[in-house]
Every structure is written in structure tokens, then in C-alpha cells.
Amino acid sequence: GAGVSQSPSNKVTEKGKDVELRCDPISGHTALYWYRQSLGQGLEFLIYFQGNSAPDKSGLPSDRFSAERTGGSVSTLTIQRTQQEDSAVYLCASRWGQQGYEQYFGPGTRLTVT
Amino acid sequence: AQTVTQSQPEMSVQEAETVTLSCTYDTSENNYYLFWYKQPPSRQMILVIRQEAYKQQNATENRFSVNFQKAAKSFSLKISDSQLGDTAMYFCAFMKPVRDNYGQNFVFGPGTRLSVLP
């Protein structure tokens, strides 16, 4: 079956522009996570969805970051007025809602803000 | 809050030898799950192995095995017969039972960069 997919694979944008990153989770997975990974670093939690609701937005670094999920499936992470410090790989992961099940990751979107 | 520590930022091992990556965690939970993920240069995160805390037997997946010491809150990964393709970042992760909608029920360590040398 298909895994988690993310698009675009790479995105180069100018400082101040808005970007949208997309995540298609594995069909049937109710939990969806967004992480940010700076070069050579660990995973920084951004936001978590259970179905269409986001009970935990605690990781979003500023109000320039927002995310939504529709139909319990596709999620979009939007970064407004991008800054150079937003440059990173953005990873999406999905998981079956039952506890104990691992996350499955997408290949990530590498965002470069020039 | 749970924390996961990986004290070895970088390690190297000769091909065909054995290497152990360490992971410790802090929790007051009794029932939880632990995972090791591998992230090669392609950046695709791949699950290597998982362990349920209620199981005393250490998990094993081919050349990968863990040493789970619940009392010590330690969860090390042993890679036997290391191969060049094992070169990657390795992340230890902790998951507590979901009793609320708190997304950080899944916590990752900072990672260990493993290089397998020919």
C-alpha cells in the first residue's frame, strides 16, 4: 500500500513569501503529526491532528505557522511571511489512532528561504 | 513531561562489527512503548524496532536487537554485523499511552549519527 507522501519534495522561496506544504497520510490513519528538522538536528514537534481537529498546537513556533486537515486525511502546513530561519526539512507522519502503534513518516519537504 | 536522551551524538563502527547505541528516558508511566528509527541520508525515517514496556523479552529484528532495562529506563540498540547501509541518524522515541489528545505523547531523542566504515 501507499505510504505517507509529501509535496513538494523541495521548495525554494524568497523571504516574506507564503508557502504551503502538503501531507497525504496513509489511508485510515487518524493521527497526523508535523515536525521540523533543521540540518543535522533532531525532530522538533510542531502540531498534532486527531481526525480533523488539532488538540495540540503547542509546537508551532509563531503565529506565522498554521495547519489544517480536511476530511480526516490530507493536511496542509502553511508558513506566512517566511523567514530564513524557517529553512529546514518539514516531516509529516501518520499513525493509526490506537495506542502503541508507531508513526510512519513521509519523505519530507526541504524548504529553503533565500 | 517525558524526555529522551541519546548521549552519543556521533559514533562509528567498522563494517561487520557490532555497535550499541544508547538511549535513556524519563517517565512516571508504567505502560509505554519505545521505538528506534533510522534516517539515512535520503532523509526517509524508517522504523527499526519497537518494544512494549510490559514485555520483559527484548525485541529483535534480524541484525537489530534492543537491551530494554525498565528499572534503569534504558533502551539501547545493538546492531550486529554492521553494513555500509546502516550509516544513518538513529532516533530513539518514547510513546506514552494516549489518555488525552496531547500530541507530544510521542517524544524523540536528539539522535545519534552512525557511520559504518569500510
Image (cartoon, coloured by chain):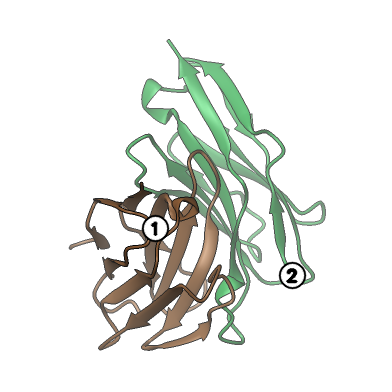
Task: Name the one closer to the observer, A82 or A78.
Answer: A82
**Residue at the disc numbered 1:** A91
Q: Is residue A94 above or below residue B71?
A: below
Measured as percent of width and height from the top left, residue A5 is found at 24, 61
User: Does residue B29 appear to the left or right of B33 in the view shown?
Assistant: right
**Residue at the disc numbered 2:** B1
Measured as percent of width and height from the top left, residue A4 is found at 27, 62
What amino acid type should be assigned to the residue bearing mark 1?
A: Leu
Using a 10 Å C-alpha cutoff, classify the residue at mark 1 as few (fewer than 14 neighbours), some (14 to 19) or many (20 or more).
many
Q: Chain A is drawn in which colour?
A: brown
Q: Residue A99 carries which label?
A: none
Q: In this view, does A107 lie above or below A103?
A: above
- Is residue A102 in sight in this rendering? no
Q: Is residue A29 above or below residue B57?
A: below
Labels 2 and 1 within one chain? no
User: Does residue B92 appear to the left or right of A5 in the view shown?
Assistant: right
Can you name the residue that lies furthest to the front here? A16
The kind of secondary structure element at disc 1 is strand
> Badges 2 and 1: C-beta atoms under 8 Å apart?
no
Query: The chain shown in green is which?
Result: B
Measured as percent of width and height from the top left, residue A34 is found at 43, 66
Residue in view at x 82 percent, y 56 percent: B71
Q: Which of marks 2 and 1 is in front?
A: 1
The kind of secondary structure element at disc 2 is loop
State which chain disc 2 sits on.
B
Residue in view at x 57 percent, y 70 percent: A59
Measured as percent of width and height from the top left, residue B20 is found at 62, 31
User: Does residue A110 appear to the left or right of B82 in the view shown?
Assistant: left
What amino acid type should be assigned to the residue bearing mark 2?
A: Ala
Residue in view at x 30 percent, y 86 percent: A72
Can you name the residue that lies furthest to the top here? B118
Residue in view at x 55 percent, y 46 percent: B91
